Amino acid sequence: MPTLPFPLPTVEQAVFLGIAAFIIASALLTVLLRNLFHASLCLTAAFFGVAGVYILLEAEFLAVTQVLVYIGAIATLIVFAIMLSRGITSQAGRLNAQGAAVAIGAVFLFVFMNTILRGVAWPVTVQAVPTDAIARLGIDFVGSYLVPFEVVSVLLLIALIGSIMIARERA
């Protein structure tokens, strides 16, 4: 049996590469699609991909938070904003015509970040995660971070009431 010139990836690496390709494709479609509704759906798909990466990193709490906050709240808010705004159906063409500029900018950003990040000495120390990390987070939310937590809650409530008022006026 002939041997391959490169090692085969493990299942975890293959899943990571698949999720990474999915995230990159979704993010590119988010930028390139001219229909805002379709772009927001692609952004939601990218958010799901990031949640998948969190699951691969065994950070289930972050994955659930990603789904609840970014998909459940932010993406839904973006979709409602697009649906409530006028004039999104009169789009010309399917793709954004600035693809060449985006590609040049992406290559420049990649080269720049690669140059900068290669010069950084990254520490390899790994700290143990406390077993009660989620409980501590909950205690902090209702303890020292209660006021900012409530301010965000009130802002989200105001945004929800405002969107309902705008929707009622148009109906």
Image (cartoon, rainbow, N blue to C red):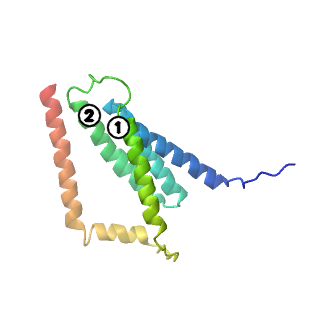
User: 2 above or below 95?
Assistant: below
Q: Amino acid at mark 1?
A: Ser
Circle 2 residues within 10 Å: few <14, some 14–19, many ≥20? some
Identify the image quadrant of the C terminus: top left
Please name the residue shown 45% across and 46% down the image: 48
In the image: residue 23, left or right of residue 142? right
Q: Which residue is mark 1?
A: 40
Q: Position of residue 28 (x, y in %)?
A: 42, 40
* Residue 41 seen anywhere in this rendered image of the structure: no
The one of 127 and 92 positioned closer to us in this rendering: 92
Relative to 9, say whether 29 is above or below: above
Residue 159 in percent (x, y) is at 18, 45
Helix, strand or loop status at disc 2: helix
Asked if the residue at tag 1 contacts the one at tag 2, i.e. Cβ–Cβ closer than 8 Å, the answer is: yes
Tag 1's secondary structure?
A: helix
Q: Residue at position x 27%, y 67% from top?
A: 142
Depth order, front residue of 32/130: 32
Which residue carries the number 2 mark? 82
Of 17 and 147, nearer the camera is 17
Snapshot quadrant of residue 81: top left
Label 1 environment density (alpha carbons within 10 Å; few <14, some 14–19, many ≥20): many
Residue ID at (26%, 71%): 143
* Residue 75 percent location from the top left of the image: 33, 43
* Residue 35 coordinates in the image, percent (x, y): 33, 29
* Amino acid at the residue labelled 2: Ile
In the displayed orientation, state which residue is furthest to the left: 169
* Horizontal arrangement in the rendering, residue 61 relative to residue 166 (left or right): right
Q: Which mark is residue 9?
A: none
Q: Which residue is more in the foreground, 8 or 76?
A: 8
**Measured Cα–Cα span from mark 2 to mark 1:** 9 Å
Horizontal side of residue 162 vs 66, given as left or right: left
